[in-house]
Amino acid sequence: MACDILEMLADGLLIQQKNVFSELLMDNQSDSIFRLNHYPPCPELHGNNLIGFGEHTDPQIILVLRSHNTSGPEISLTGGSWIPVPADQESFFINVGDSLQVMTNGRFKSVRHRVLANSYKSRVSMIYFGGPPLSEKIAPLPSLLKEGNDNSLYKEFTWFEYKRSVHKSRLSDNNLCLFEKITAS
Ligand SMILES: O=C(O)CCC(=O)C(=O)O
Ligand SMILES: [Fe+2]
């Protein structure tokens, strides 16, 4: 499913090579993981917010999430407000990761998100994190750049370099800012 979605995204961007993103997940060396998160109920909350998973963006290419019918996830809007993602046990939630933001030169955005704990129901989520091989070079696709590449927003890095940088930082840090190009004004 992740590959099908990535191929539709490539199509939407009029990229000729439809598998330009999905081939990274299909690679034998793909650094993809599958994770189960369990958020136990927190009855002592008494209506107050408690963070179950702190705010962050996901560093990989694409995430596919499914959970049962308990609310909790929220996404951040520009301006700093948080909006809840409605619980729906029959849907998959698809999230763009930082690497896809870079490869599309910012056309698709890696959204900051967090999960609030629930006071009376437990929540389980399962997430597929689709990542490229460690040695893969991540950079804006030339076909999405103007001639001369002068509108590239990011420096090239390998997935290994980015992962190392993410592991050294705090969960809430904006990891991509270290790899942004400073444009002369
Ligand atoms: O459990 C969830 O719904 C999301 C957790 C999450 O954002 C993550 O594991 O990266
Ligand atoms: Fe996440």
Image: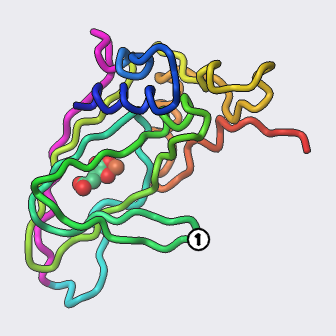
Q: Residue at x 32, y 20 (%)?
A: 25
Compared with residue 67, is residue 36 higher up or lower down, i.e. above or below?
above
Q: Report if residue 181 lies within the magenta region.
A: no
Identify which amino acid the numbered label 1 is placed on.
Gly
Compared with residue 76, is residue 49 higher up or lower down, i.e. above or below?
below
Where does the C terminus fall, quadrant-wise? top right
x, y percentage for residue 17?
A: 46, 14
Residue that numbered label 1 is attached to? 79
Compared with residue 3, is residue 89 higher up or lower down, i.e. above or below?
below
Give the extent of the magenta segment. Answer: 25-43
The image quadrant of residue 32 is top left
Disc 1 element: loop
x, y percentage for residue 167?
A: 45, 38
Residue 5 relative to residue 82: left or right: left
Label 1 neighbour load within 10 Å: few <14, some 14-19, many 20+:
few
x, y percentage for residue 33?
A: 24, 30
Q: Residue at x 74, y 25 (%)?
A: 146
